Image (tube, rainbow, N blue to C red):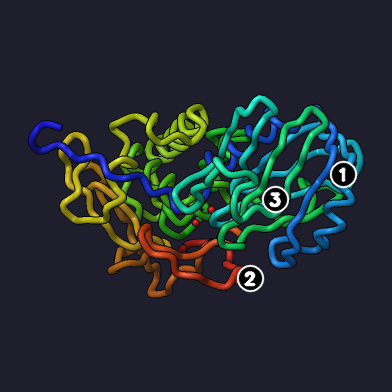
C-alpha cells in the first residue's frame, strides 16, 4: 500500500458466524441432499452429543434420506424423510469436511478450526455420514463446545425458535427493523450481537456493519435517527450478503472492509484509506472502530461513560448471547460456562 495506507493483517475469524455456518450448510447441501445415508459412524462423545446417545444418533441416521440442509443464525439442521432430524451447532470450532468418490474435497473451516483433510477421516471428527453414492461427510469438533441433537422440528423448538430474524434468509422490512432497534436501550453494537434480535451476527460482522454505516458502536440504539437506522439496515444486508456470496472466503471480501485491518489489535492499525483504527470494549467484546468516520452521538438522559452506556445512572442488562459462546478477545480464548444465559437488552458473540 501507499504511504499512510493500512497493511492487510492475517484474518482471524475465531469462531463461526453466519457466513461460516452458511458455508457449512452449502457443503452439506452439495454432498448430502438427495442421497441416502449408507452408513453413519460416531465417536462416543457424550458432551458433543446432547440429548441423544451417539449410538442412537448412528442408528437413526443410517438409512436416512436427506431432503434438505437448513440454517438459522448459527444453527443448522438436516431435514430427513422421517423424523427426528439432526440439529447441529458449530460452537467455537465446529466444521464440516467432505470428500467425493473421485477425491474432490471441500472443507468449511476458519482460524479456530483448521481441518487437515489430507488424512481421512480428519482429526477430531465426531460423526461421519457415508452416502450411497460414495460421498463421505465428517463433522469436526475440536474444542467440544459444539452440539449435536435430534429434534422433531428444530425450527419450532429451542434454541432455534428463540432466535431473532436471520439477516440472510428473512431480513426484517425496514419499518419493522426500525421499531425493533429503536425500542432497545443499550448500545447499537449490543443490539446487533443479541441473538434474540438478530440471529447469526458475531463480533467482526457487527463491527463491519457499524463501520460501513459510519456509526459509533456505543451509540444508544434508541437514539438513532431514521437515516442511521436505514444505514445499519442496508449495511447489515450488504455485509452478510457479500460474505455469504463468497462462501466466507475472507480473501475475496472487499479490500476496503475494516475486516482486513482489524485483527492485529494495535492502536497503530489503519484502514485502506489510512484512517486510524481504535479499539474499545462494547457489549463485552473487543470492538474495532474508526474515530474519524464513526462519530459518537448521544441524547438527553444518555451518557457514554468509559466502556459502557449508562442511562439514568443504571447499567443496562447484557444481551442474550449465542449458545456455547465465549466472551473472548480476538487473540485470546477465555472459556465461559456454556450454560450461561444473558437477558435480552443492552449489553454484551459463533
Q: Disc 3 or 2, which lies upstream in sequence?
A: 3
Q: Identify the residue at image location x=45%, y=57%.
A: 190
The secondary element bearing badge 2 is classed as loop
Find disc 1 in the rendering and name its residue.
Answer: 62
Tell which tag, 1 or 3, sits nearer the viewer. 1
Q: Quadrant of residue 315?
A: bottom left
Could you say where residue 280 lies in the image, as x and y percent from the top left?
29, 60
Could you say where residue 201 lies in the image, as x and y percent from the top left?
51, 47
Q: Is residue 338 left or right of residue 275?
A: right
Find disc 3 in the rendering and name its residue.
Answer: 88
Q: Disc 2 or 1, which lies upstream in sequence?
A: 1
Visible residue check, residue 222: no
Mark 2 surroundings: few (<14), some (14-19) or many (≥20) residues within 10 A: few
Q: Pointers 1 and 3 in contact (CB under 8 A)?
A: no
The image shows residue 344, relative to residue 128, as above or below, that is: below
The image shows residue 82, relative to residue 102, as above or below, that is: below
Q: Identify the residue at image location x=67%, y=40%.
A: 71
Q: Is residue 144 left or right of residue 333?
A: right
The secondary element bearing badge 3 is classed as strand
Find disc 2 in the rendering and name its residue.
Answer: 339
Q: Quadrant of residue 11?
A: top left
Could you say where residue 218 lies in the image, as x and y percent from the top left?
34, 56
- Between 23 and 221, which is closer to the camera in this rendering? 23
Q: Identify the residue at image location x=21%, y=35%.
A: 272
For the N terminus, the image quarter is top left
Q: Pointers 2 and 1 in contact (CB under 8 A)?
A: no
Amino acid at each position: 500500500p501507499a504511504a499512510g495506507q493500512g497493511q492487510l493483517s492475517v484474518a482471524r475469524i475465531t469462531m463461526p458466524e453466519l457466513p461460516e455456518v452458511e458455508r457449512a450448510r452449502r457443503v452439506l447441501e452439495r454432498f448430502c441432499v438427495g442421497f441416502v445415508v449408507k452408513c453413519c459412524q460416531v465417536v462416543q462423545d457424550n458432551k458433543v452429543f446432547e440429548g441423544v446417545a451417539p449410538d442412537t444418533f448412528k442408528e437413526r441416521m443410517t438409512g436416512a434420506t436427506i431432503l434438505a440442509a437448513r440454517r438459522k443464525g448459527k444453527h443448522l439442521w438436516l431435514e430427513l424423510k422421517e423424523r427426528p432430524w439432526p440439529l447441529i451447532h458449530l460452537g467455537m470450532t465446529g466444521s464440516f469436511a467432505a470428500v467425493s468418490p473421485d477425491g474432490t474435497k471441500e472443507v468449511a473451516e476458519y482460524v479456530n478450526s483448521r481441518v487437515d483433510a489430507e488424512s481421512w477421516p480428519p482429526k477430531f471428527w465426531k460423526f461421519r455420514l457415508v452416502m450411497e453414492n460414495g460421498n463421505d461427510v465428517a463433522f469436526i469438533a475440536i474444542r467440544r463446545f459444539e452440539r449435536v441433537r435430534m429434534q422433531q422440528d428444530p425450527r419450532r423448538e429451542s434454541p432455534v425458535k428463540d432466535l431473532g430474524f436471520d439477516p440472510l434468509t428473512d431480513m426484517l422490512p425496514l419499518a419493522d427493523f426500525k421499531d425493533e432497534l429503536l425500542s432497545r436501550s443499550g448500545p447499537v453494537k449490543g443490539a446487533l450481537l443479541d441473538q434474540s434480535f438478530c440471529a447469526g451476527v458475531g463480533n467482526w460482522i457487527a463491527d463491519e456493519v457499524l463501520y460501513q454505516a459510519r456509526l459509533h458502536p456505543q451509540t444508544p440504539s434508541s437514539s438513532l435517527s431514521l437515516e442511521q437506522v436505514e444505514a445499519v439496515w442496508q449495511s447489515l444486508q450488504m455485509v452478510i450478503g457479500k460474505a455469504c456470496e463468497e462462501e466466507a472466503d475472507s480473501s475475496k471480501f472487499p479490500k476496503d472492509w475494516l475486516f482486513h485491518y482489524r485483527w492485529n489489535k494495535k492502536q497503530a492499525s489503519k484502514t485502506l484509506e489510512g484512517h486510524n483504527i481504535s479499539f474499545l470494549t462494547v457489549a463485552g467484546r473487543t470492538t474495532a472502530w474508526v474515530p474519524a468516520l464513526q462519530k459518537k452521538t448521544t441524547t438527553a438522559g444518555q451518557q457514554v461513560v468509559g466502556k459502557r452506556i449508562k442511562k439514568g445512572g443504571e447499567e443496562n442488562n447484557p444481551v442474550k448471547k449465542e449458545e456455547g459462546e465465549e466472551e473472548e478477545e480476538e487473540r485470546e480464548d477465555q472459556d465461559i460456562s456454556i450454560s450461561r444465559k444473558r437477558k435480552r437488552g443492552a449489553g454484551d458473540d459463533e
